Each structure stands twice: as structure tokens, then as C-alpha cells.
Image (cartoon, rainbow, N blue to C red):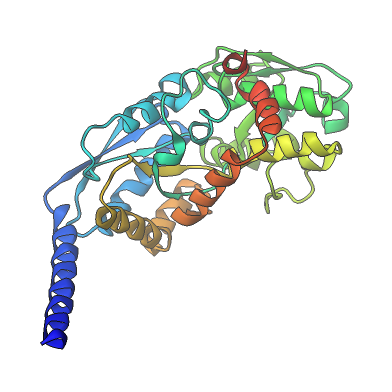
């Protein structure tokens, strides 16, 4: 009798699991997913997100419609705050975060009202290695020259990478970038350097430059003087990496922590509390999209670099960052978010 009872409950458990899976698979049919995009229309994050969305939908059972909603305020933190407070834990809201949003709370950003470790990280479309470059008319052609001569670089908001990265370089390796902030991030930065208002740009991602200004690269209008990443870009094997210039052990830990933001790149995220079966569907759909020939062909046509991280890899990086020594976090935060550490 005991064996029959055990067998009955085993069969019941299998049936319940199958029913749950079938229910989850059918959940998205006829539904709409809202995708919050932490940048303005036409920006790098927006282009990646809108290229990704229709292919992602094809790999979700039921093929839900995906509607992008741009929320560029506060350097993308508005989108992160909005996602965190979505009351419905149903898997119908996702976000394409800016890379800085993932670690803004760690670095004490007053605008980050969420806990990054509670988000469900679906995956990242690509890494986001920043570079610093001068215009082809500039007399400064090398990093060594940038350590001895002042260079005016254009920046967007004070919390943008184009303002933060040159400040970090000034502090850690003694460059002499003079940062002028306030330029529109989608067109103003480009116009500033093309018009001669600024001599260079520091903190734009190489992948964004390739996608938005391929003529700059094709026509050799840029002198790329340094790259910032945990590893060198295949496109730029001869361009020095900032990490190679940081010899102090603590300073190197600080820079490596900051560079995790770039490694996280272009995250796709959903809110805390989404049921595991629906989260599993979204993660699987993301992984399939990253291998989808149609998506990869669209990305190549748009000039987008695809270098994905899985959900597990992202979660591991987030845990590593938030587990760093407090003194290292404080010093990194003072560079990235000084207002949040006063």
C-alpha cells in the first residue's frame, strides 16, 4: 500500500510539473511585454534593444508583442527605478539597462533607488568597452601625450560615462582631460568634436562608435589613444589598455571593479519576484536569440557587436562586485559617484 501511495504522489508531482510548464509556455500568447529602455531614441542602447526585441519575441512561446518605452532620464537610472517598483511580478516588463545602472547603488548614487542584487538578470547582449580618442586634427595622438597636454573632451551629463571615464583616467594615470559637460548624448557629442568645440571624446563605447559613426573609423578621423576593458578589444590590438598603466595594487582593484560595469555591457533584466517558470522562459529565449542566425545577420547589418553574457555569468559578476572590499568600493564610488559618497 505504501508503495502504491508513493507511486501515486510521484505521478501526481510529474503531472503537476507538466501542467505548470504547459501553463508557463502558454502564458505569453496574446500578451504584450513592455521593454523599458534606459536611453533616448537612436542612442546605442536603444538601437541594440530594438534590434534584439523582435527576435527575442520569436523565441518566447506564444510570441508576445514587445513594445519599447524609452526612459533616458538620470543616465538610465529612471528605467531601473521604474522596473524595480513594477507591482506586477508577471514577467511582462523587462528593461534594457545602461551598464552603469547595475552598479549605481553600490557606488552610492543618490538616484538609484533599488537593489541590483534582487533584479532577475536575463543576459547581456554585449560588453561595452569604452575608449578615449582625439579628433584627427588634434596634435595629441598618444596616451603619453595626453598625460602631458590638456585636452578638452565633450561630455554628456555629469553621471554619464563621457564625464566619468576621463575623470577616472585623470585620477589614476595622470591624464589631463578637461571635461566640458552638458552635450546632448545622441548628437551633441558628435557635433562637438566634428565642429572643433572639443578635441576628443572619452568614455564612448567602441561598439557604439562603430554603429553610429562608421565613417569616423573608415576614414581614420579618430586617434584612439586608450581602451578601457578587462581584456583588449580584437579590433584594437595595438591600442594601449588603461589597466596596463595602473601599477598600484589598490588602484588596480579600484579600476577592475569599475570595469565590471563595462563587462556587464548591455543588460536585459526583469523585475524581482517574477515566477521561476516564466523567468526560465525569458532566459532560454535570450540564449536562443544570441545564437539566432537572423538576429546575428541583423546585428551585422546594423554594425552591432554581439558578445553576450548569460544570466548566470551576469549574476556572478554582480555578486563579485558587491562583495568587493569596502575600502575599494568607497574609492571607486568616489570616482564614479562622488555626490553619493559625501
Q: Position of residue 319 (x, y in %)?
A: 54, 45
Measured as percent of width and height from the top left, residue 25 is found at 18, 61
Say above or below: 37 vs 234.
above
The quarter of the picture where the N terminus appears is: bottom left
Query: Which of the pair 269/331 is nearer the observer?
Result: 331
Observer-nearest residue: 267 or 217?
A: 267
Q: Residue at x 56, y 35 (%)?
A: 213
The answer to whether 51 appears left or right of 181 in the picture is left
Give coordinates of residue 130: x percent, y percent.
64, 37
- The quarter of the image holding the C terminus is top right
Please indicate, yes or no, whether residue 108 appears anywhere in the rendered image. Answer: yes
Residue 240 appears in the rendering: no
Relative horizontal placement of residue 336, taking residue 135 as reference (left or right)? left
Residue 287: horizontal and vertical position, in percent?
Answer: 40, 60
Residue appearing at x 16%, y 63% in the figure? 20
Where is 342 relative to 63, above or below? Answer: above
The foreground one among 321 and 180 is: 321
Please indicate whether residue 6 sits to the left or right of residue 44 in the image. left
Q: How many marks?
A: 0
* Closer-to-camera residue (87/45): 87
Q: Is residue 52 above or below residue 254?
A: below
Q: Looking at the image, which residue is at 48% across and 32% down?
A: 101
Q: Quadrant of the rendered structure where residue 91 is?
A: top left
Picture residue at 72% right of the left edge, 34% below the top: 254
- In the image, 222: left or right of 4? right
Amino acid at each position: 500500500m505504501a508503495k502504491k501511495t508513493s507511486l501515486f504522489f510521484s505521478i501526481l508531482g510529474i503531472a503537476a510539473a507538466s501542467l505548470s510548464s504547459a501553463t508557463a509556455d502558454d502564458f505569453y500568447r496574446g500578451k504584450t511585454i513592455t521593454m523599458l529602455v534606459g536611453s533616448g531614441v537612436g542612442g546605442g542602447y536603444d538601437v541594440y534593444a530594438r534590434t534584439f526585441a523582435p527576435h527575442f519575441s520569436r523565441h518566447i512561446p506564444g510570441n508576445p508583442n514587445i513594445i519599447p518605452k524609452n526612459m533616458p532620464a538620470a543616465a538610465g537610472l529612471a528605467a531601473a527605478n521604474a522596473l524595480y517598483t513594477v507591482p506586477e511580478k508577471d514577467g511582462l516588463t523587462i528593461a534594457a539597462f545602461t551598464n552603469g545602472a547595475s552598479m549605481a547603488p553600490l557606488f552610492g548614487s543618490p538616484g538609484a533607488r533599488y537593489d541590483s542584487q534582487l533584479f532577475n538578470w536575463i543576459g547581456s547582449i554585449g560588453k561595452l568597452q569604452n575608449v578615449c580618442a582625439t579628433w584627427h586634427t588634434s596634435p595629441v595622438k598618444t596616451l603619453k601625450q595626453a598625460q602631458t597636454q590638456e585636452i578638452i573632451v565633450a561630455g554628456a551629463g555629469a553621471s554619464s560615462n563621457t564625464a566619468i571615464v576621463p575623470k577616472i583616467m585623470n585620477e589614476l594615470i595622470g591624464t589631463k582631460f578637461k571635461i566640458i559637460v552638458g552635450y546632448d548624448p545622441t548628437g551633441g557629442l558628435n557635433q562637438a568634436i566634428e565642429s572643433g568645440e572639443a578635441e576628443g571624446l572619452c568614455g564612448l563605447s567602441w561598439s557604439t562608435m562603430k554603429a553610429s559613426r562608421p565613417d569616423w573609423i573608415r576614414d581614420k578621423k579618430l586617434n584612439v589613444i586608450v581602451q578601457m576593458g578587462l581584456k583588449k578589444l580584437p579590433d584594437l590590438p595595438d591600442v594601449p589598455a588603461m589597466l596596463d598603466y595602473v601599477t598600484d595594487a589598490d588602484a588596480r582593484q579600484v579600476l577592475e571593479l569599475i570595469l565590471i560595469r563595462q563587462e556587464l555591457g548591455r543588460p536585459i533584466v526583469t523585475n524581482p519576484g517574477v515566477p521561476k517558470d516564466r523567468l526560465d522562459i525569458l532566459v532560454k529565449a535570450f540564449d536562443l536569440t544570441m545564437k539566432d542566425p537572423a538576429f546575428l545577420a541583423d546585428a551585422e547589418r546594423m554594425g552591432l557587436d554581439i558578445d553576450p553574457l548569460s544570466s548566470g555569468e551576469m549574476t556572478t559578476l554582480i555578486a563579485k562586485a558587491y562583495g568587493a572590499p569596502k575600502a575599494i568600493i568607497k574609492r571607486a564610488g568616489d570616482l564614479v559617484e562622488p555626490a553619493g559618497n559625501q
